[in-house]
Image: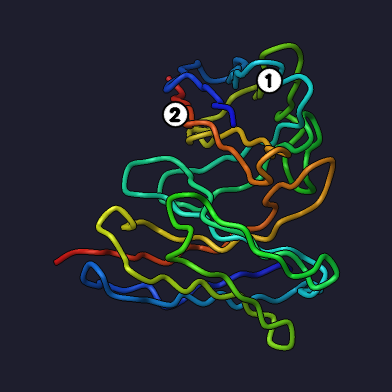
């Protein structure tokens, strides 16, 4: 199995772009999904397959994946984007999902 | 609209059993794999287990932390999925989420319920 490493916290000013990283060896060969969990709420899928937005997710959310790092980008950050963000990958060897530890996004 | 609603959360003593239910609507339940995930207080997301659709054999798989104690079942006629939890431990205390597993390039969880709180304490 493998571990997905995320920074515990990221801070960004309103209107700027937030970048949240998810790292493991050769993650670029895997498909990464991202979830947003606002305080006290249920998780919501915001990006899947590295860079695809589900219906209803604003275009401000995007993703990339290459080498050892996958990234979630949130452009024109709003106060309402304050949340915990989790990356997830499916481990095909063990046939179960692996989650990152989560990143708390604070909008200054 | 896809809806998932968990029920059955409770306060139980260590070693006891509890069954959670997840009622679903708004999609063709039989076509989807379903999963249970949990989140301990102040902690991150943890996958608990998974039941595939009948077309994929209805097989189940579980995280090592619950294997042998928890079991997942589904009732396609009622669009329900269940989590039977036996030999509960204090560390099983968490909010338990039912989630729909969607197949894209790999599996992601595209719809989640609101969660059911399970507290294991003496």
Of tags 1 and 2, the one toward the viewer is 1
Q: Image height check: is A65 above or below A1? A: above
Q: Quadrant of residue A28?
A: top right
**Tag of residue A104:** 2
Do residues under tags 1 and 2 come within 8 Å of each other at their CB atoms? Answer: no
- A19 vs A88, nearest the viewer: A88
Q: Residue at x 67, y 83 (%)?
A: B75
The crowd level at tag 2 (other Cα within 10 Å; few <14, some 14-19, many 20+) is many
Residue A106 % position (x, y): 44, 25
Q: Residue furthest left?
A: B122
- A54 vs A95, nearest the viewer: A95
Q: Residue at x 81, y 35 (%)?
A: A52
Side (left or right) of A31 relative to B3:
right
Mark 2 secondary-structure assignment? strand
**Tag of residue A91:** none
**Tag of residue A70:** 1
The crowd level at tag 1 (other Cα within 10 Å; few <14, some 14-19, many 20+) is many
Q: Quadrant of the N terminus of chain B?
A: bottom right
Please report, as a chain letter, where disc 1 is located. A
Task: Indicate which disc, 1 or 2, sits on the residue closer to the N terminus.
Answer: 1
């Amino acid at each position: 199995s493998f571990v997905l490493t995320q920074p515990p916290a990221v801070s960004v000013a309103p209107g700027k772009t937030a970048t949240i990283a998810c790292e493991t060896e050769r993650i670029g060969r895997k498909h990464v999904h991202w979830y947003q969990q606002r305080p006290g709420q249920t998780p919501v899928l915001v990006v899947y397959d590295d860079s695809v937005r589900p219906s209803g997710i604003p275009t401000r959310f995007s993703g990339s994946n290459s080498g050892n790092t996958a990234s979630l980008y949130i452009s024109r950050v709003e106060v309402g984007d304050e949340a915990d963000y989790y990356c997830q990958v499916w481990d095909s060897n063990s046939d179960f999902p692996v989650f990152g530890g989560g990143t708390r996004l604070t909008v200054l | 609209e896809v809806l998932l609603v968990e029920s059955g959360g409770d306060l139980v003593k260590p070693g006891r059993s509890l069954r959670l239910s997840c009622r679903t609507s708004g999609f063709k339940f039989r076509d989807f794999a379903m999963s249970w995930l949990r989140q301990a207080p102040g902690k991150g997301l943890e996958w608990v287990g998974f039941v595939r659709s009948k077309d994929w054999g209805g097989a189940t798989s579980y995280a090592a932390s619950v294997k042998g104690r928890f079991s997942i079942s589904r009732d396609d006629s009622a669009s329900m999925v269940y989590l039977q939890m036996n030999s509960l431990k204090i560390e099983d205390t968490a909010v338990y989420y039912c989630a729909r597993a969607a197949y894209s390039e790999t599996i992601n969880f595209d719809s989640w319920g609101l969660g059911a709180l399970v507290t294991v304490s003496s």
